């Protein structure tokens, strides 16, 4: 009963002996068991040397009989060939998020609500850490791991099966005979702090950029097209929910976790059942005290009503279960010193002051810079070089300077002043309100680099392989002096750049050539005209249909469009008036860029948010900006990046920016995150 070999150049003439076949099966079972003890239970029973011998023996047998290699073999965790893009996966069940609170009183209120809705005085809760990683869905079919995906928008995630397979603590086979035929579980993938620091050291040694925090490192490692990269990254997984199963539903969350353990899945080791809410508060306090000692990052604890039938009775809201709550820790604060104030120059020439700090560790991450946003903010907080300041970091929000801490009898430096010339190119600096701009445009290397990065980004011309480092070299060596020069590059020139060989040069030139056929909206967005983002670019493309029509429009014509106010009109008009811009566009077309009219947008006039526009400022805690924008758009609303009198709502999250001030100035209705969610809920029902 010979099978055809899957591997053409394998020694297919070798007859499989029964003894070898049995030995191979035994080895796989043994190694799986030791993997489980080592990676999940953290209690190895054999030495590394013994393990290596077993592993090596299996490798040899599989080399002898390649047809016996199965995808769940312990040798198959090394990663597969790179992909062009991650596929999409529809989740078995929507992946919800959690309501979150920081105030203990809100936890007491939650308890009251649960008691009222369930009509009881006694509720058992389970508590466990809220892991600061990436949420994933893992699907097992008859015990074999067959599919894994990211959360995505909650319904549709990205297929990261081959990447997840490389994570050692994720069993490729479930253990127990009693495991259900079909099982989808939810868990969190994260990186332990020690591993994160070691990885960053390795990256820096190789001249690569370090990751800002363990969460980014985990995300970057997991959403990889090349699973061999994922395989080299120290990721771990922990599971905390059964999302769907053909087997019986465990009667409680606690029983569910125990079932997961039975099946060989890793679950949170730090977990507890609480008879009443006081114990929940105590667990939160104690865990927060222990936070610094934990080998991984957590940002709070998750409280769940334990009984399954009660969970079912309580049900869901639109995006979160009623029976669970994320009880977050307060943001981390640290005291440090401002060593200098530097200026960074962005793509549109905006000068942003940046505090260079005496490095401090905040929650396992070294912070050495914080944005100061703009000159007004520096003045308002009165931050000067040499000052002592309190910085805050909440989740992955960029650290901000919360306040200056006055030090008695200290002689302070002079107040900070914005420079009058650009620190990069020396051009004059112009001022608009609190904002300062370099007037150098494309002659300023910082602006040119930013412009090229923006032009080649995914949402614009999508030139893959044109990363920050390459752009910097192209500009610094004078190979690219405006956008059109990208289409003049040749193999010779790329060869001379650091990090380029024949293959990578060819790939980049191909990517550049491919970008030559481009929908009008993406081209417009790529030009980087101030105030013209993805949305406005789409509006313009739909309204005008061709680049020529847009280039010959005047301010009034632009302003007749509902979404476009005087500022955007002015910005568009002056961009297309500028001779150098017209020349670059002309050159791009001569070099073969073919700009396609964009397809018309579907009519959304019947939807509840039709005609309403939203501007977001500050961070949202319960969803990402992209998720929020997608929800608004699904309901027919539009998301804009700037506030005008015509804006319907400004949604202000954590640490809102200047848009909040603008909203108040223009009398635009401001919603906080909760009000925004309520509005969504109401509109989803209609
Ligand atoms: S339960 C239906 N438990 O926190 C309940 N979530 O929005 C689903 N998270 O994205 C979540 N640790 O990825 C649960 N022990 C835990 C968790 C946890 C971290 C994440 C989850 C979700 C976010 C809350």
Image (tube, rainbow, N blue to C red):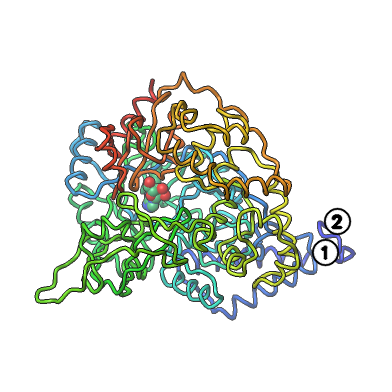
Q: Residue 316, how many percent across, how many down?
A: 36, 33
Please identify the residue farthest to the right as the structure is shown: 13
Q: Confirm whether residue 256 shows in the render.
A: no
Q: Which secondary structure lies at badge 1?
A: loop
Residue in front for this viewpoint, 575 or 396 = 575
Return the residue at label 1: 16
Label 2 CA crowd tier, 10 Å (few <14, some 14–19, many 20+):
few
Q: Residue 476, how many percent across, how many down?
A: 58, 69
* Image side of residue 447 versus residue 30, left or right: left
Compared to residue 538, the image places residue 507 above or below, namely below
* Image side of residue 293 versus residue 261, left or right: left
Compared to residue 71, the image places residue 125 above or below, namely above
Location of residue 339 by image quarter? bottom left
Q: Confirm whether residue 430 shows in the render.
A: yes
Residue in front for this viewpoint, 36 or 336 = 336
Label 1 CA crowd tier, 10 Å (few <14, some 14–19, many 20+):
some
Q: Residue 562, how many percent across, how many down?
A: 44, 26
Specify which label sits upstream in the sequence, 1 or 2.
2
Q: Looking at the image, which residue is at 13% across and 72% down?
A: 407
- The answer to whether the residue labelled 1 contacts the one labelled 2, judged by CB atoms less than 8 Å apart, is yes
The numbered dot on residue 2 is 2
Whether the residue carrying mark 2 lies under 8 Å from ligand 1 is answered with: no
């Amino acid at each position: 009963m010979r099978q055809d070999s899957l591997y053409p150049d394998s020694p297919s003439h070798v007859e499989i002996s029964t003894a070898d076949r049995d030995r191979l099966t035994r080895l796989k079972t043994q190694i799986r068991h030791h993997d489980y003890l080592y990676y999940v239970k953290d209690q190895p029973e054999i030495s590394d040397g013994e393990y290596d011998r077993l592993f090596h023996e299996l490798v040899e047998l599989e080399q002898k009989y390649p047809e016996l290699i199965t995808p769940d073999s312990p040798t198959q965790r090394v990663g597969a060939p790179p992909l062009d893009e991650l596929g999409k996966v529809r989740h078995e069940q929507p992946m919800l998020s959690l309501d979150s609170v920081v105030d203990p009183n809100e936890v007491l209120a939650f308890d009251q609500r649960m008691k009222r809705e369930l009509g009881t005085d006694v509720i058992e809760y389970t508590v466990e850490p809220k892991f600061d990683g990436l949420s994933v869905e893992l699907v097992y079919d008859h015990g074999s791991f067959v599919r894994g995906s990211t959360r995505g928008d909650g319904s549709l995630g990205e297929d990261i099966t081959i990447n997840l397979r490389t994570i050692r603590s994720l069993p490729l086979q479930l253990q127990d005979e009693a495991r259900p035929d079909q099982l989808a579980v939810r868990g969190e993938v994260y990186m332990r702090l020690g591993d994160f620091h070691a990885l960053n050291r390795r990256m820096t040694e190789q001249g690569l950029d370090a990751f800002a925090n363990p969460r980014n490192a985990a995300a970057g490692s997991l959403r990889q097209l090349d699973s061999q990269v994922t395989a080299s990254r120290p990721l771990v997984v922990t599971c905390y929910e059964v999302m769907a199963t053909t087997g019986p539903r465990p009667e409680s969350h606690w029983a569910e976790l125990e079932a997961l353990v039975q099946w060989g899945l890793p679950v949170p080791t730090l977990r507890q059942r609480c008879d009443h809410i006081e114990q929940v508060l105590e667990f939160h306090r104690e865990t927060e005290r222990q936070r610094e000692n934990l080998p991984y990052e957590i940002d709070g604890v998750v409280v769940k009503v334990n009984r399954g039938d009660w969970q079912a009775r309580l049900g869901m809201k639109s995006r979160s279960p009623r029976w669970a709550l994320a009880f977050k820790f307060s943001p981390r604060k640290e005291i440090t010193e401002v060593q200098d104030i530097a200026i960074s120059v962005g793509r549109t020439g905006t000068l942003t002051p940046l505090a260079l700090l005496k490095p401090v560790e905040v929650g396992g991450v070294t912070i050495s810079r914080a944005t100061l946003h703009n000159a007004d903010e520096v003045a308002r907080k009165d931050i000067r070089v040499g000052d002592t300041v309190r910085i805050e970091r909440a989740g992955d929000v960029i650290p901000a300077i919360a306040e200056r801490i006055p030090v008695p009898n200290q002689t302070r430096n002079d107040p900070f002043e914005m420079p009058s010339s650009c620190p990069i190119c020396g051009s004059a600096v112009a001022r608009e309100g609190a904002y300062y701009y370099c007037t150098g445009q494309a002659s300023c290397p910082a602006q040119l680099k930013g412009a090229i990065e923006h032009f080649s980004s995914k949402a614009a011309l999508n030139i893959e392989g044109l990363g920050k480092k390459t752009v910097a070299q192209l500009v610094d060596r004078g190979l690219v002096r405006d956008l059109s020069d990208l289409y003049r590059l040749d193999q010779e020139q790329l060869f001379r750049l650091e990090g380029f060989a024949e293959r990578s040069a060819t790939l980049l030139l191909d990517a550049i050539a491919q970008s030559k056929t481009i929908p009008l909206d993406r081209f417009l967005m790529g030009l980087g005209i101030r105030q013209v983002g993805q949305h406005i670019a789409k509006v313009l493309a739909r309204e005008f249909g061709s680049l020529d029509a847009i280039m010959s429009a005047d301010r009034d014509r632009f302003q007749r469009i509902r979404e476009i106010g005087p500022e955007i009109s002015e910005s568009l008009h002056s961009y297309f008036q500028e001779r150098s811009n017209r020349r670059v566009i002309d050159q791009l077309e001569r070099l073969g860029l073919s700009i396609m009219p964009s397809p018309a947008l579907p009519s959304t006039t019947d939807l509840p948010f039709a005609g309403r526009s939203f501007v977001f400022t500050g961070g949202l805690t319960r969803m990402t900006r992209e998720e929020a924008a997608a929800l608004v758009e699904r309901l027919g609303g539009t998301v804009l990046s700037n506030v005008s009198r015509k804006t319907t709502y400004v949604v202000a999250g954590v640490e809102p920016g200047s848009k909040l001030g603008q909203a108040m100035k223009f009398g635009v209705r401001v919603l906080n995150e909760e009000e925004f969610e309520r509005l969504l809920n109401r509109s989803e029902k209609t």
